[in-house]
Image (cartoon, rainbow, N blue to C red):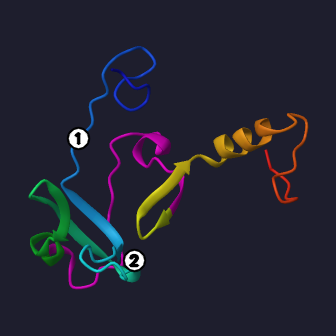
Amino acid sequence: MAILGLTHDENGSALEKLPVTIKVAIGEGPTPDDENSSPRALFHFVFKRRTVREQMVYWEPAPDIAEVFGDKPTELAVIFLHDDPREVCPSEYALWTRKGRLCHGELVQIAASLRNAGDPKDSRAPGGGVLAG
């Protein structure tokens, strides 16, 4: 089954994406074994390598890559393989909790769905706020 934008493009061609094997992060995620753990920000980059154990994906430190950039790097040189920033760095709004991502999407889509839930001419959000856009 094809999913537009995820597995196939508008022309019906299959999308080919490179697998992510190394991640550059500016924070540490919660500890998987500790339910009271929460993410924490760092003031430097860390490099993580994707590993799979017992069908679970873990991101573990990649000391061989960190060694190239130093102990606590704050700057990295980046080369993008595409001229369109949306293609290279897709972004979205998301609500995260300790249990994971609860919802996600672009703000324009969220505002449109809220606006269409009631009177389409009404630009007020639930609770009295005003929707932009």
Q: Magenta residues, as a range?
A: 68-95
**On screen, residue 66 above or below 11:** below
User: Please, which residue is most extreme toward the top here?
Assistant: 11
Could you classify mark 2 by the number of other residues whose Cα lies within 10 Å: few (under 14), some (14-19), or many (20 or more)? few
Q: Nearer the viewer, residue 30 or 14?
A: 30
Task: Residue 122: give its label.
Answer: none
Left or right, 51 with respect to 7, comes to: left
Magenta segment: does it hold 43?
no
Left or right, 128 with respect to 51, comes to: right
Q: Please name the residue shown 27% across and 74% down the image.
A: 46
Left or right, 72 with respect to 107, comes to: left
Image coordinates of residue 42 in percent, x first then y, are 38, 82
Quarter the C terminus occupies: top right
Magenta segment: does it hold 94?
yes
Image coordinates of residue 21 in percent, x first then y, are 18, 54
The secondary structure type at the circle numbered 1 is loop
The secondary structure type at the circle numbered 2 is loop
Could you classify mark 1 by the number of other residues whose Cα lies within 10 Å: few (under 14), some (14-19), or many (20 or more)? few
Q: Please name the residue shown 34% across and 28% down the image.
A: 7
Q: Please name the residue shown 18% across and 75% down the image.
A: 66
Q: Name the residue under label 1.
A: 18
Q: Name the residue under label 2.
A: 39
Image coordinates of residue 1 in percent, x first then y, are 33, 20
The amino acid on which the numbered mark 1 sits, given as a three-letter code, is Leu
Q: Nearer the viewer, mark 1 or mark 2?
A: 2
Q: Is the magenta stretch mostly helix, strand or loop?
A: loop
